[in-house]
Image: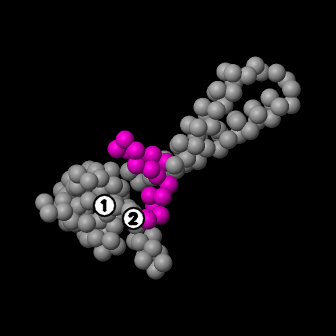
Amino acid sequence: MDDRKNARSELKGTTLRVYWVLLKHGEKGVGPRDITRELGLSSPSVAAYHIEKLLNLGLVEKTDDGSYVPKKNIDAEVVSDFVRMFGMMLPRFFFYAILFTTMLITFLAVYPLRPDPQTVVALIFGVTACAIFWVETLRVMRRRPF
């Protein structure tokens, strides 16, 4: 538990941005110079400093060729809102937003719109769920550091 608190307190600012770059590149690995270019840091030593912090936290490891890769199965709270799919980090809420939007569109396409209570309630629930999940998806996307 103490390690988790330590990782949470250390993963912010530039260190978090460096961690996101490492996550984005995945198993290919990336070196300090590449991170410096991608994030616009002042020098590779700044990137190396933040990589060293991530190494000490146990979030990344160094490969034989000198590049750095994120460790697998790390329970970092900062990435718990995201799922890696098709080489992208997508918010978890994105999938729920797609599901509820598809259900609402299917409902509108299959059932005729009538002013009866069942249709009105179904529309209210569908639109509300879609709105909530899309707002949460956009909120999480804006919060990401990359």
Residue 20 percent location from the top left of the image: 35, 56
Marking on residue 88: none
Q: Which residue is mark 1?
A: 70
Q: Residue at x 14, y 63 (%)?
A: 64
**Circle number at residue 74:** 2
Q: Is residue 141 left or right of residue 70?
A: right
Whether the residues at callouts 2 and 1 have beta carbons within 8 Å, the answer is yes
Q: Element under label 1?
A: strand
> Up-down: is 23 above or below 111?
below
Judged from this view, the residue extending furthest toward the bottom is 2
Q: Judge whether residue 43 is colored magenta.
A: no
In-image side of 104 versus 36 (left or right): right
Q: In the image, what residue type sits under mark 1?
A: Pro
Quadrant hosting residue 69: bottom left
Which SS class for mark 2?
A: loop
Q: How many numbered discs sit on the rendered protein?
A: 2
Q: Which stretch appears magenta?
A: 74-91
Q: Position of residue 93 (x, y in %)?
A: 55, 47
Percent from the top left, x then y, of residue 4? Answer: 45, 73
Q: Residue at left 43%, top 65%?
A: 75
Callout 1 environment at 10 Å: few (<14), some (14 to 19), or many (20+)?
A: many
Residue 133 in the figure: left or right of residue 76: right
Q: CA distance from mark 2 to mark 1?
A: 8 Å
Query: Does any portion of residue 91 appear in the rendered image?
Result: yes
Q: Please name the amino acid that badge 2 sits on.
A: Ile
